[in-house]
Image (tube, grey):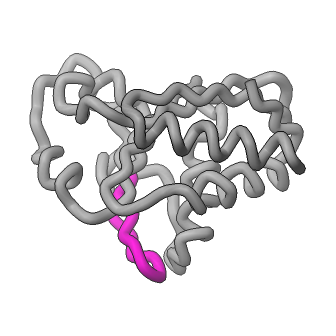
Amino acid sequence: MIKINDLEEMKIFGSILTKYLSAGDVILLDGDLGAGKTTLTQFIGKTLGVKRNINSPTFNIIKSYNGSNLKLHHLDCYRLENSDEDLGFDEYFEDQAIIIIEWSQFIAEYLPASSLTIDIKTISDSARAIELKASGKHYVDIKEAVLSELSTD
């Protein structure tokens, strides 16, 4: 469990995580409303060099951004609960971009077999607890690298 005490620590976590991400990586963000999923996505985007403002794509479901070297696809699947609509998710998973998905449980049948899940739990107004869950060797390596770097700070 990673304890995040404030926005600055969330920013640091996002920048450390981003160092280990590469094209095609799929990040699943779990957590209650207001836990910080979009905030973490904003920090990842800034680290990638995204200049545009990243906000929740709740009504668009998918927003894409260009970073310095990589694209970022941000999906918010909250509105897809109880929907069986395929919005062409395969195209995004096959794109050479980093894919971040909020509320991924609502599109579970479309998700790739391997991914990194980041579960964000609210502790207080500013503090969060983060748990990383890796599926697949590539994501286990990312998880271990992030945890190792955080433990040396």
Count of numbered marks: 0
Q: Residue at x 42, y 60 (%)?
A: 22
Nearer-the-camera pick, 106 or 17: 17
Q: Position of residue 35 (x, y in %)?
A: 65, 32
- Segment tinted magenta in the rendering: 64-74
Q: Position of residue 142 (x, y in %)?
A: 54, 44
70 horizontally vs 130: left or right: left
Magenta span has 107? Answer: no
Height in image: 72 above or below 10?
A: below
* 136 shown above or below 94: above
Direction top: furthest residue = 82
Residue drawn at point x = 81 percent, y = 37 percent: 4
What is the quadrant of residue 115 in the picture?
Answer: top left
Q: What x and y, as percent, mark residue 30?
A: 51, 28
Q: Residue at x 38, y 57 (%)?
A: 98
User: In the picture, residue 95 is in which quadrant?
Assistant: bottom left
Q: Is residue 142 left or right of residue 91?
A: right
Q: How far across and how far down the image is residue 6, in percent?
A: 86, 44
Q: Quadrant of the N terminus?
A: top right
Examine the residues drawn in magenta and state their main secondary structure: strand
- Residue at x 41%, y 35% (from the top left corner): 137
Residue 105 against residue 16 in the figure, above or below: above
Q: Is residue 73 magenta?
A: yes
